[in-house]
Image (tube, rainbow, N blue to C red):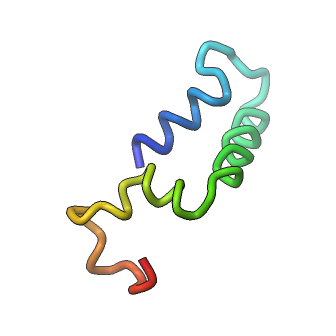
Amino acid sequence: MDTLWGQGIDVINPNRQYARLDEQVKLFITHLFSLSNKEALQTSSVLSKSFWLKPVLSKNF
């Protein structure tokens, strides 16, 4: 999940200070929705064989 967060921050420009937090959150969420399902799962390591929450995830992964 850290990688997903880090890449999202890189996309919305980590060196810019936003006047409002909701503006930054909106850009981050827009970035997340731009990822395909597979990209989001791979980036967050959910598809890894050693993902620590794998036993409680849906069998659709």
Left or right of 2: which side holds 36? right
Residue 38 on image: x %, y %: 52, 62
Counting labels gives 0
Relative to 28, does residue 38 appear above or below in the rendering?
A: below
Left or right of 16: which side holds 49? left
Residue 14 on image: x %, y %: 59, 20
Relative to 31, does residue 14 appear above or below in the rendering?
A: above
Residue 7 on image: x %, y %: 52, 35
Residue 34 on image: x %, y %: 70, 50
Relative to 4, does residue 50 appear above or below in the rendering?
A: below
Determine the residue positioned at 69% across, 16% down: 17
Question: Which residue is the extreme one toward the bottom?
Answer: 59
Determine the residue positioned at 48% across, 44% down: 4
Q: Quadrant of residue 58?
A: bottom left
Determine the residue positioned at 45% across, 83% down: 60
Determine the residue positioned at 41% across, 49% down: 1
Q: Quadrant of residue 47?
A: bottom left
The quadrant of the rendering that contains the C terminus is: bottom left
